[in-house]
Image (cartoon, rainbow, N blue to C red):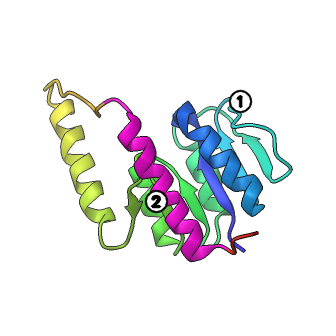
């Protein structure tokens, strides 16, 4: 059985009902990790973990608990890289499944954009989270569960 870890500090509220339904339906042991209290809802399968404040405290805690084949929901590309290096899986809030084949490209693009911002250039940032992102996430999350998790009836 896989466990689900949710990097909750930047989790869009619109994803919470999708996650909660799947967690309860599939009885997925879930850890919601954040620097402050964040709730996705009440479930016997969810454990909320609030870590001390700090840039990578939640990430470090997730990586520490993570085991092979677990799933992490995160928009944090460096965390996704660490997850993949532990032979686990990561999906971002917009439905992108990070893999060994694509994570280095995402890291390189992230680093490039950070260099541009550090040089004083003003960048647009990510586009607003929309309905298409919600649908992409729901589809990818469902596909992952179908392929990697025992589906309850």
Residue at the location (71% across, 51% down)?
Answer: 31
Q: Which residues are magenta?
A: 128-149
Q: Is residue 23 left or right of residue 141?
A: right
> Which of the two residues, 108 or 102, is positioned nearer the viewer here?
102
Q: Is residue 28 left or right of residue 63?
A: right
Q: Quadrant of residue 132?
A: top left
Residue 48 image point, x, y percent? 76, 42
The main secondary structure of the magenta stretch is: helix
* Residue 117 appears in the rendering: yes
**Crowding at label 2, few (<14), some or many (≥20) Cα neighbours within 10 Å?**
some
Which residue in the protein does label 2 denote? 140
What is the quadrant of the N terminus in the image? Answer: bottom right
Q: Is residue 139 left or right of residue 128?
A: right
Residue at the location (81% across, 39% down)?
Answer: 42
Q: Is residue 122 above or below residue 6?
A: above
Residue at the location (30% across, 73% down)?
Answer: 101
Mark earlier in primary sequence (2, 1):
1
Which residue in the protein does label 1 denote? 37
Residue 79 image point, x, y percent? 47, 54
């Amino acid at each position: 059985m896989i466990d689900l870890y949710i990097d909750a500090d930047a989790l869009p509220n619109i994803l919470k009902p999708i996650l909660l339904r799947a967690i309860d339906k599939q009885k997925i042991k879930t850890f919601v990790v954040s620097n402050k209290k964040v709730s996705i809802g009440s479930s016997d399968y969810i454990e909320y973990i609030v870590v001390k404040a700090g840039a990578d405290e939640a990430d470090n805690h997730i990586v520490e608990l993570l085991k092979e084949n677990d799933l992490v929901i995160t928009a944090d590309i460096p965390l996704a890289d660490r997850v993949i290096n532990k032979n686990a899986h990561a999906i971002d809030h917009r439905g992108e499944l990070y893999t060994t084949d694509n994570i280095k490209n995402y890291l390189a693009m992230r680093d490039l954009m950070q260099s541009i911002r550090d040089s004083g250039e003003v960048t647009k940032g990510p586009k607003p989270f929309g309905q298409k992102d919600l649908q992409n996430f729901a589809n990818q999350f469902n596909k992952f569960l179908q392929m990697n998790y025992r589906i309850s009836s």
